[in-house]
Amino acid sequence: MAINAADLPLKNAFAELPSAFYTRLMPTPLPAPYFVAASSSAAALVGLDVAALAQDDFVAAFTGNAVPARAKPLSAVYSGHQFGVWAGQLGDGRAILLGQLDTPAGPMELQLKGAGLTPYSRMGDGRAVLRSSIREFLCSEAMAALNIPTTRALMITGSDQGVMRETVESSAVATRMAPSFVRFGSFEHWYARQRPDELRILADYVIAAFYPELAGESNPYKALLAEVTRRTAHMIAHWQAVGFMHGVMNTDNMSILGLTLDYGPFGFMEAFDSQHICNHTDQQGRYSYANQPDVGHWNCHKLGQALLPLIGNVEDAQEALDVYQGAFAAKIDELLHAKLGLDVALPEDGQLFAAMFALLDRHHVDFTQFFRKLGMLQLELPTLDAPVRDLFIERDAFDAWAVTYRARLRHEHRTDSERRRAMDAVNPKYVLRNYLAQVAIDKANNKDFSEVATLLAVLEHPFDEQHDNEAYAALPPDWASHLEVSCSS
Ligand code: AMP
Ligand code: MG
């Protein structure tokens, strides 16, 4: 579809809500914006030609310099719990919703992140730096390719206008896409203000637009809480299975659609450590790998509290929240079976999984490589275990677990090659390791954006053997050990 950015057929259902939910405003232009990167699969989702995104009209539109005629730009208000503490009003401090595009899969909202000050910017400058925009862009698209529920990233533009962080960095705008950016904190906001009418309007909007099947339930608000709880549990099971750590699971970063939202100080597990904390700012480890499932439940609880005036009684809210443990357990069990190439489920499998995690934890084995190389195991040929076995400094430790694993595999009916194919389809070879992102960022800071595109292309096919790209599956180099990521940038 050849279309000018100015003519994008945008609608904005969120803007039809009462004005209490947002502030209408215009993005603040950036000087001399340039194209950094775009995702062809994200573009395809909204019927845009990725090549067109590099043209001046789209660069201007998606920097916020030339707002499409039919856009109704706005920033939404929300509140939230940050690191377990009520933080009061937050809101889109640097994000501006342009509107939505209709797609065969339903409406997709387009949001500019880093497009300037809003009434919710608080102490911030309304900007995003190129570094963090590249991280969000790559990780959004990597997660989508890993089949994990996520917001998407359409493109990044940059500008030489400096923004102050620890040092001066160049600014960027990332265009994100999701059916909705409503968060748990969007509901907490009205609950805290004791405004049941707005709470109901928002819940009715979310149900009608995104959960229409719940509208006919006897208590649709309870059904909404139960469904969001289930989706959140499933999303976090997916995170655990691929070693993804979000880093800042505040309730304002929890999507009402169960999508991974707000990529900041995230990380993928490398040398396995269940207590790993990927966010340098998170000194207590509230959002460590091991804590993510419980934090997800805690966050749902905060949503439940906010929806309580609509649900009507604590018992119903509790019942909806009780969905969490079962949904998480069932999903992680399913994903771990798949990761280990197990087709049938046996009662003792929980023990096998626990022993495996203990083994990985004790020997700090690279999470991604372990599962990928485990797929090469040949049932009757332990002498050929080297690929996975050599990941362990103490080879005997692997051998002992492998005895149990082999015994377990004898209850399966797949051949070695069938099992490997099944495992390769769920155990990625390529994930967004911090050092890979850093290499792309360092080049981008010198105006060479080629590595962003190359890395995106690799991460779009995480399960494939990409023979020219073996290097992207490598363990982090020594220089990467000092890489730190922290909250908003
Ligand atoms: P985050 O940790 O990125 O989820 O952000 C938490 C809150 O701080 C949200 O309300 C953001 O909009 C706001 N925020 C983060 N960075 C900035 C910034 N540079 N300018 C304005 N607001 C920001
Ligand atoms: Mg946020």
Image (tube, rainbow, N blue to C red):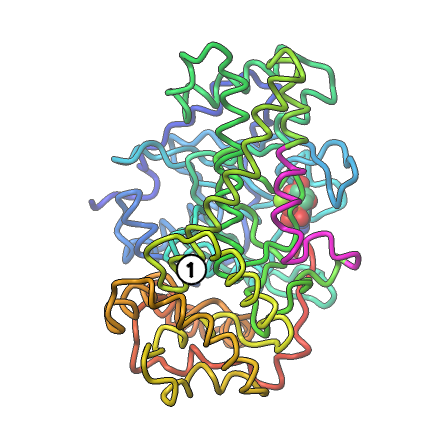
Single out the residue that lies furthest toward the left. 1
Residue 273 figure quarter: bottom right
Q: Is residue 384 magenta?
A: no
Q: Position of residue 388 (x, y in %)?
A: 44, 81
Based on the picture, tell me whether residue 293 belongs to the magenta stretch.
yes
Q: Residue at x 74, y 22 (%)?
A: 192
Horizontal and vertical percent position of residue 435: 55, 75
User: Front-most of 206 and 412?
Assistant: 412
**Mark 1 sits near ligand 1, with its Cβ under 8 Å away:** no
Residue occupying image coordinates x 26% and y 51%: 49
The C terminus lies in quadrant: bottom right
Q: Nearer the viewer, residue 275 or 69?
A: 275
Q: Taking 485 as reference, is 343 left or right?
A: left
**Residue 354, how many percent across, how many down?**
57, 61
Query: Which residue does the image show at 54% across and 57% down from the upper left?
Result: 172
| Residue 317 visible from this viewpoint | yes
Secondary structure, mark 1, is helix
Is 80 positioned to the left or the right of 240 in the image?
right
Note whether residue 117 is visible. no
Residue 23 placement (x, y as % from top left): 60, 27
Which one is nearer the viewer's eye here, 209 or 454? 209
For disc 1, the marked residue is 142
Specify the segment rendered in magenta.
Answer: 283-300
Within 10 Å of disc 1 (Cα), the crowding (few <14, some 14-19, many 20+) is many
Label total for image:
1
Q: Quadrant of the N terminus?
A: top left
Locate residue 42 relative to residue 291 in the image: left or right.
left
Task: Give the quadrant of residue 272.
Answer: bottom right
Vertical side of 163 occupied by 177: above or below: above
Q: Amino acid at mark 1?
A: Ala
